[in-house]
Image: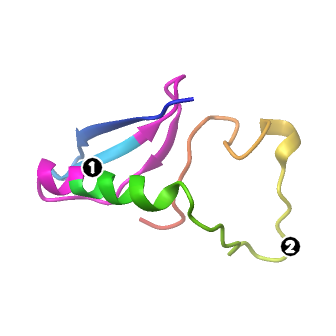
Amino acid sequence: MNGIFELFTDGNANVRFRLVDSEGRELAVSCSYVDKDSAVQGISQVRECAGMGLVQDHCSPTMQADTKSSGGRIPADGQMRRAAE
């Protein structure tokens, strides 16, 4: 499965990128950048570290992973969200 990085302008006129899967589901959204060149550099950094990046679990101990209802790590609506932004 190949992902696609999409550049876009957010509501504050900053450049961001999102990673979408082959079915168009949004998997991740970047922080904001001042221009396209900076966003492209951010994509390069993600490509370098994400493939072999470690997973750190910062969930509260009472949270249970629900992999049955959504079939995996992607929520049922296909949208990944950051806790605070």
- Residues rendered magenta in the picture: 19-40
Answer left or right for 56 relative to 35: right
Q: Is residue 36 magenta?
A: yes
Going by the numbered disc 1, the residue's amino acid type is: Arg
Report the Cα–Cα distance between label 2 and label 1: 33 Å
Percent coordinates x, y for residue 6 in the rendering? 32, 36
Reply yes or no: does residue 47 show up in magenta: no
Residue displayed at 20% across by 58% down = 33
Circle 2 or circle 1, nearest the eye: 1
Q: Which residue is pictured at 34% across the width and 60% down the height?
A: 45
Q: Is residue 1 above or below residue 44?
A: above
Residue under numbered circle 1? 16
Q: Is residue 2 left or right of residue 67?
A: left
The answer to which of 29 and 10 lies nearer the viewer is 29
- Pick the residue in front: 71 or 43: 43
In the displayed structure, does residue 52 sit left or right of residue 39? Answer: right
Q: Which residue is mark 2?
A: 62
Q: Residue at x 17, y 53 (%)?
A: 14
